[in-house]
Image (cartoon, rainbow, N blue to C red):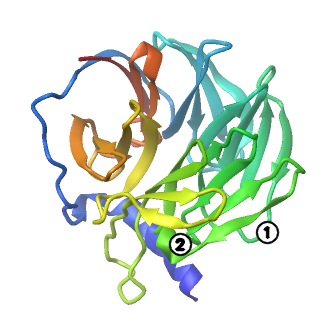
Amino acid sequence: MLKKISVAAIAISFTIACKSKQPIEAVATSSKPTVTLRSETPNLPHAESVVYDPKSNLLYVSVQGEQEPGDGSIATLKLDGSLKNIAFAKGLNNPKGIAIIGNRLYVSDVTELVQIDLENGNILNKFSAGDEQFLNDVAIDKSGNVYVSDMGSSSIYKLGLDGNFEKWLSSPDLENPNGLLVVGNTLYVAAWGLPDANDTQAITQGRFLKVDLKTKNIEKVTSQPQGNLDGLQVYDNQHFLISDWRKGNIYKASKSGEMELFFASQVSVGDILYIQDQKILALPLNRQNTVQIFEVTN
């Protein structure tokens, strides 16, 4: 029964964002860089996640569609924001997080992890353990293992090098994990927050977390909940960029847990992308059906 409650609470929280409680405020800083809009790509129905492939010099965007079976796709954009292909890969149900390794693209699709050929967009495999509830972001470690967050069961699944897909870690301490990012032997987690079992209408908030890939030990990077955290990217050697889906803010978070406002975007900013060497920030805006591309200058 608790699992059903948690999934319902997540679904409700997406629809009542305007009634949310205020999260703990990030500390503003006077040294914020300049973030300048370069382009905006419209007509991407419920764009959710953006990833960059340096080999093709293209952005890949998960397009959820109108949540009808099979109307989801992966679109491709050039770095100037021009649309190359609205349906590079198609036939997906509700695609969210994306990650690329070699010539394979992995995307979460409700209760499946889908493997796609990066050369032609063909679906190669679909992986499911059978008990997934609400798969979201995807991350890949240096060995090629693929991790997928499940916001519905506060779990993380893993596709191993042997092709085995299983629940790797499940704990309320993951606080319904959303965004994932592997750095070395650490899996960083942007958490959505756990629902209140006694009040399914309550709006929750999650912390910035980290998980040791070897021991599976979970630690809080931020001691207090920060918001409905979504996208997670490396900014520099000591900081990350994290999006808050509900408030529409992008925060800069240090490895020691300090949070400051980096950029004010819009409500429903999803799984963001930051290309460090080009200082490009790409923001998928889910409700607005667009992807915005910004240039970041210090």
Q: CA distance from mark 1 to mark 2?
A: 16 Å
Task: Say which label, 1 or 2, has the lower sequence index.
Answer: 2
State left or right for residue 62 relative to residue 112: left
SS at badge 2? helix
Please state the horizontal and vertical placement of residue 274, each as a whole percent of the image: 44, 28
Q: Which mark is residue 7?
A: 2
Please state the horizontal and vertical placement of residue 244, each as a whole percent of the image: 33, 49
Q: Residue furthest right?
A: 162
Q: Is residue 3 above or below residue 104?
A: below
Please state the horizontal and vertical placement of residue 145, each as a whole percent of the image: 75, 46
Callout 2, which amino acid?
A: Val
Query: Which residue in the structure is indicated by mark 1?
Result: 130
State left or right for residue 234 relative to residue 298: right
Residue 11 can be seen in this image: no
State left or right for residue 190 relative to residue 158: left
**Dot 2 surroundings within 10 Å: few (below 14), some, or many (20 or more)?**
some
Callout 1, which amino acid?
A: Gly
